[in-house]
Image: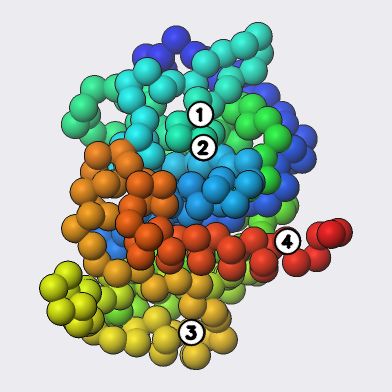
Amino acid sequence: MADKKIQFNLLNQDDLKNIKHIIMVMSGKGGVGKSTIAVNLAVALSLEGRKVGLMDIDMHGPNVMRMLGGTEKDHPYQVGEKILPPEVNGIKVISVSQFVPESGKPIVWRGPIKTGTIKQFFNDIEWEDLDYLVIDAPPGTGDEPLTVMQMLKRFDGAIIVTTPSEVSKDDVERAINFFTVMNKKVLGLVENMAYFECPNCHTKHYIFGKNGAKSLAEKYNLPILAEIPISEEIRTNMDNGKPAAYFGKPEHVAPYVQLAKKVIAEVEKDEEK
């Protein structure tokens, strides 16, 4: 990040009082579509009339800018002592990829550098007034989610992404228990790649197994917030920076809208009407 013109000044935003709700999207293992869920949840929350920010703390695989539709011009910019995140498709977004412009350049950082970067994302970025800050965490329970949990006094809960496979379930249990150890709330599970629906006969095929999230939800008394199908269209749209919650077919938009509505209902249930 040092090669960028913007330099961080270790500002204090007084515990982020201008952000109403903070949630994290994470997974026990990689390859389950966690960032796809995070990006589309942010977009769906925006479509529900909320002001949303998206913080990508996946330092080694920062993909949210591509998925959200960001370009090389979408960099944070400095106004006085404040560093403002750009707005992409209605979402304020910050990612380490904005500071490493060379395509394919590896981010070879040890834990202390990653921890320091996350602290800067919280302390130095002026998020302005947000209803939700969605944090896209890397797979597993390492430095990045641990840093966030230790830093935040206010945290509304985590959404844990899984697929139906047994391997994914094993790692999701570790993620659930991570939040138990940290005394933080899990809002629920999202089962991604839950099924493939044949476009011709409309038969559902459970490629990675069936009811994987259901068994975990019952074991840990957690709700299933959404079941997202495998879809070539969703994959293509995300690769091309067209979030499915904006650009997808109705049957692909619906699960993300459902997810956003359930998050809103749970997180905002105690707010004054």
Give the percent coordinates (x, y) of residue 84.
Answer: 58, 22
Extreme-right residue of the structure: 272
Q: Residue at x 51, y 66 (%)?
A: 258
Disc 3 residue type (three-letter): Ala
- The Cα atoms of the two marked residues, 4 and 1, are separated by 24 Å
Say whether disc 4 or disc 1 marks the residue closer to the N-terminus: 1
Is residue 65 shown above or below 6?
A: below
Labelled pair 2, 1 in contact (Cβ < 8 Å):
yes
Say whether disc 3 or disc 4 marks the residue closer to the N-terminus: 3
Labels in figure, total = 4
Disc 1 residue type (three-letter): Glu
Mark 2: give few (<14), some (14-19) or many (20+) Cα within 10 Å: many
- The Cα atoms of the two marked residues, 3 and 4, are separated by 22 Å
| Residue position for label 1 | 87
Residue 118 visible (yes or no): no
Quadrant for the N terminus, please.
top left
In terms of depth relative to the viewer, which is nearer, 254 or 262? 254
Query: Mark 3 against mark 4, which lies toward the viewer?
Result: 4
Q: Secondary structure at mark 4?
A: loop
| Residue position for label 3 | 217
Report the disc number at residue 268.
Answer: 4
Q: Secondary structure at mark 1?
A: strand
Give the percent coordinates (x, y) of residue 25.
Answer: 48, 58
